[in-house]
Amino acid sequence: MDIKSQTKEALVGVLAEWGHPAYRADQVLRWIYSQHATSWEVMTNIPAALREKLASEFTLTTLGFVRLQGAADTTRKFLWRLKDQSFIESVLIPANPALDGDKSDRHTLCISTQVGCAYGCRFCASGLDGFKRNLEAAEIVDQVLAVERYIQANPPTTPEGTAVAPGEKIVSNLVIMGMGEPLANYDNLLTALKILNAPWGGGIGARKITISTSGLAPQIGKLADEPFQFQLAISLHGATNATREKIMPVNRKYPLEELVAACEYYQKQKGRMMTFEYILIAGVNDAVAEVAPLASLAKRLNAKVNLIPYNPVEGLPWQRPTEAVAEAFLNALLKRNVSATLRREKGGDIDAACGQLRLRTMKEANASKV
Ligand code: SAH
Ligand code: SF4
């Protein structure tokens, strides 16, 4: 077990069994989540014997930095190596004060939950290589800490960049939209989010954590019964079974009727607005005829629609529509009084869509082997 997979209650319990008071847990957790400690030795206020005991019972592993794409004042994509040599990605997006009013030193981090993905959406780079394994809770948690460690160790050289003082947190929002299907790794995801949400851990508010799913209806129902106000984003990409089935095999397992029922239950339990992610793929789901069913679903579920022009993936045939087509789709939704936005930034410049940096790195590694 890794120490970063432990909630405070679990750690207090273990320490009590060993005959130690609860404040020792606070000390350990402060070292890990406030001081970004990467070894037991630095925890100098913990007695040496207890440090040794902790080290023999728990691992304290950290993600290995492999490469970084993007400049300090834009979106930055991190590629990490896990202990089994697999790769995962996290994407750091600076807050846009003009857009969301947030201070510009706050960031949204997009994190991964699995190595690969079993759901095989036809347009997605993450599923291309199939599914390898679930991430442990610690591997989900450490994506936040690893980004903060990296930025502390590599202060920005431009005035636009964000410097991080030791112990300072820069990740204010989390989106679970990296590689993998988060709800297919339900237990580890929930443990990780409890840790990242807790005041003694990541300190990120539940309302600032968005879980994106391709539509695992039963798990959406389960999540609705949890005592957390996480935001839910549904990767819809089609508002009829016919369109959705063309690009998302998961729709055969959980057709729209079932997905919508689960979303309605989530809505009822949480009383919050949800989002529909809708990537626009040329000639697949961008026809004006798709607008009416999408608008009626959005209204029924009180959902906001995020339109995202598709990021082409090397080796896949799909393209993004022209700007005119995307704008027309947006305007048709707005005309029906649906709350909708169209992403216009050029994330494609750094392969911003999930799984793409990993895919490129694996291809390069394979090419250099032959
Ligand atoms: N498995 C989850 C979360 C990870 S994918 C899910 O599917 O929701 C995060 C988002 O990126 C999803 O909405 C997914 O459809 C989208 N996505 C995947 N490949 C993309 C691409 N090439 N261009 C734009 N968005 C993409
Ligand atoms: Fe998996 Fe999400 Fe990619 Fe679909 S879009 S293959 S569910 S990561």
Image (cartoon, grey):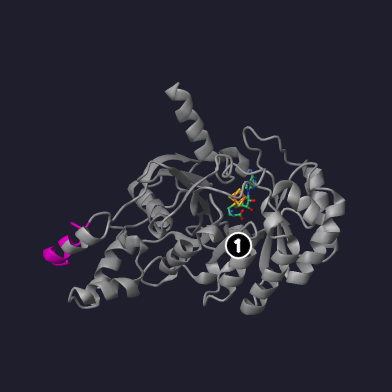
Where does residue 361 sit, x and y in percent of width and height? 48, 34
**Can you see residue 329?**
yes
- The answer to which image quadrant residue 200 occupies is bottom left
The residue closer to the viewer here, 320 or 137, is: 137
Vertical side of 41 occupied by 350: above or below: above
SS for dot 1: helix
The amino acid sitting under disc 1 is Asp
Q: Position of residue 99 (x, y in %)?
A: 63, 59
Magenta part mainly helix, strand or loop?
Answer: loop
Magenta residues? 40-52
Residue 176 can be seen, yes or no: no
Pointer 1 residue: 100
Quick check: 73 above or below 303? above
Residue at figure coordinates x 38%, y 52% from the top left: 146
Which quadrant does the C terminus fall into?
top left
In the rendered view, would you say 338 is above or below 243?
A: below
Residue sticking out furthest to the right: 289
Q: Look at the image and say whether residue 45 sits in the magenta stretch.
A: yes
Left or right, 330 with reference to 216:
right
> Quick one: quadrant of the N terminus?
bottom left
Q: Is residue 19 left or right of residue 340?
A: left
Q: Nearer the viewer, residue 80 or 120?
A: 120
Q: Residue at x 16, y 60 (%)?
A: 52
Q: Residue furthest front?
A: 253
**Looking at the image, residue 133 lies above or below residue 171:** above
Name the residue located 62 percent from the left edge and 41 percent from the top edge.
348
Q: Is residue 239 left or right of residue 146?
A: right
Q: Position of residue 166 (x, y in %)?
A: 31, 58
